[in-house]
Amino acid sequence: MRTLIRVGIYVTTFLILTTLSGYLTFRFMGAGKTVTVPDLRGKDLIEANRLILEKRLYLKVQAEEFSTDVPAGYIIMQSIPPEEKIKEGRTIEVVVSKGPKRYYMPNFVGMLVDEAREKAIEKNIKIERVIKVHSDRFVTDMVIAQMPDAEEKGSDKVTLLVSSGKFRIPYVCPDFMRMGLDEAKALADRLGLELELTGFGGIISAQKPAPGEIIFRGDVVRLKLKYKEDQDLKWL
């Protein structure tokens, strides 16, 4: 009985040692050849698999991601960098492109820029750039145009053209004190200025801004009026 037990122990030990020896032989001799990792980036799975098999490596798709730079079905990145030296039998994991995420672009034209930003967040659209231009037709901060256009499919980024209001043309404020009221109104119309009149009469007795100050198209010039008789009495 004891002999049988000893034989059993010997056989079990032999099998364990034989298995371990075979594994170590394969690990360090059979699978010990060093190979250079190929560059799989930008290649489709068929070509990548061919390159991997030539090196006696294995290929595994780890994940798929959206990409605007790499076409669908092509490899974006790999787990082991190209040109690295590794042993045969290793597995290279890759991330494969699903192509660009497809979006339908909302229509932002006619919205104020703050409203457009809220809409973009709601639709997962990124406002990449806001370009401001002067416009006589659109109020300040209103979206005039967009790129891509509304309903265009494909992009998740948009550039907005936004009104900064009317173009402000600078002028040197005229001396309205030397003019009659009708002449002052005609000049203000030509320069795109607004007149605010106080008092009564046909003579300009004061103005603000003062003559020579810088003003802009659309600004208000305040003129104080008096009757000619009051002006004459001033000099008596």
Image (cartoon, rainbow, N blue to C red):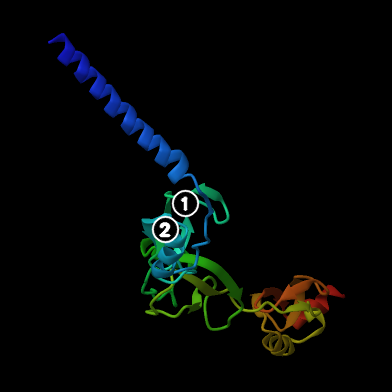
Vertical placement of residue 137 versus 22, above or below: below
Question: Do we see residue 125 in this rendering?
Answer: no
Amino acid of disc 2 = Val
- Mark 2, other Cα within 10 Å: few <14 / some 14–19 / many ≥20: some
Q: Residue at x 71, y 79 (%)?
A: 169
Residue 75's x, y, as percent? 44, 64
Determine whether the residue tagged by mark 1 lies in a helix, strand or loop.
Answer: loop
The image quadrant where one finds the C terminus is bottom right
Report if the CB atoms under discs 2 and 1 are less than 8 Å apart. no
Question: Do we see residue 143 in this rendering?
Answer: yes
| Disc sitting over residue 122 in the figure | none
For mark 1, what is the residue?
79
Residue 3's x, y, as percent? 17, 12
Residue 20's x, y, as percent? 35, 31
> Disc 2 vs disc 1: which is toward the camera?
1
Residue 119's x, y, as percent? 39, 65
For mark 2, what is the residue?
95
Front one among 117 and 57 = 57
Vertical placement of residue 2 versus 112, above or below: above
- Mark 1, other Cα within 10 Å: few <14 / some 14–19 / many ≥20: few
Amino acid of disc 1 = Ser
* Residue most extreme to the left: 1
Is residue 61 toward the left or the right of residue 41 in the image? left
Q: Give the mark, 2 or 1, whose residue is nearer the N terminus.
A: 1
Front one among 164 and 145 = 145
Q: Quadrant of residue 11?
A: top left
Q: Quadrant of residue 106?
A: bottom left
Is residue 150 toward the left or the right of residue 208 in the image? left
* Residue most extreme to the front: 3
